[in-house]
Amino acid sequence: MTGIFFKAMLGIFIASLLCIAPKQSLGGEEKIILIGEPDSGQKSVGESREHKNPDNTIKGLKERVRYLEKRVRELAWEIKLLKDSKDSTSASVPPIRQWRMLRIGMPQEKVREIFGEPGRIKKHSSGEYWYYPDTSGGKVSFTQPGIYKIRTVSGWNEP
């Protein structure tokens, strides 16, 4: 009797560590209940959500992990570029990899995040030019503010 009790307690303990309740049978259909899923947002720890097929849950979690890993790599790259741009002085030409991040329609604030403050700004009738590090280096062209009162990249010349 003690052995059965021990095995049952061990099973409950392991299931609680894995955040998976033991299989429950409801009308002949077995279901696995996950407790406190990290991406549920609406359920708190201790509440449960039923999943008829654990393979779909595992597949979904694997997809989520792949997406999050990709996003972490993207953010790490952006952080590195921002650190590089902040480490460089305003008198230096930004590295070519930063120029390659520019996109038509990108707002000025994003350009400022990538390159830092321009060495020189020149306003003209149809927008603005930002020079890095000065007029002898590269140039980013911006349109006049549109309905959202934001200037966006209309073109650029790499140094």
Image (cartoon, rainbow, N blue to C red):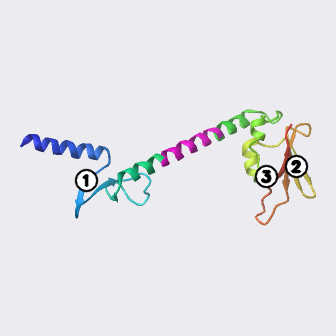
Q: Is residue 128 magenta?
A: no
Q: What amino acid is labelled 3 in the image? A: Ile
Q: Earlier in the sequence, mark 1 or mark 3?
A: 1
* Residue at image point 85% right, 59% down: 144
The circle on residue 41 is none
- Viewer-side label of 1, 3: 1
Q: Quadrant of the N terminus?
A: top left
Residue position marked by numbered label 3 in the rendering: 104
The circle on residue 23 is 1
Task: Look at the numbered disc 2 and give the secondary structure of its residue.
Answer: strand
Residue 64 point in image, percent of width and height: 49, 48
Residue position marked by numbered label 2 in the rendering: 129
Magenta region: which residues? 63-77
Q: What amino acid is labelled 1 in the image? A: Lys
Secondary structure character of the magenta stretch overall: helix
Residue furthest bottom as drawn: 147
* Residue at image point 40% right, 53% down: 56
Q: CA distance from mark 1 to mark 3?
A: 54 Å
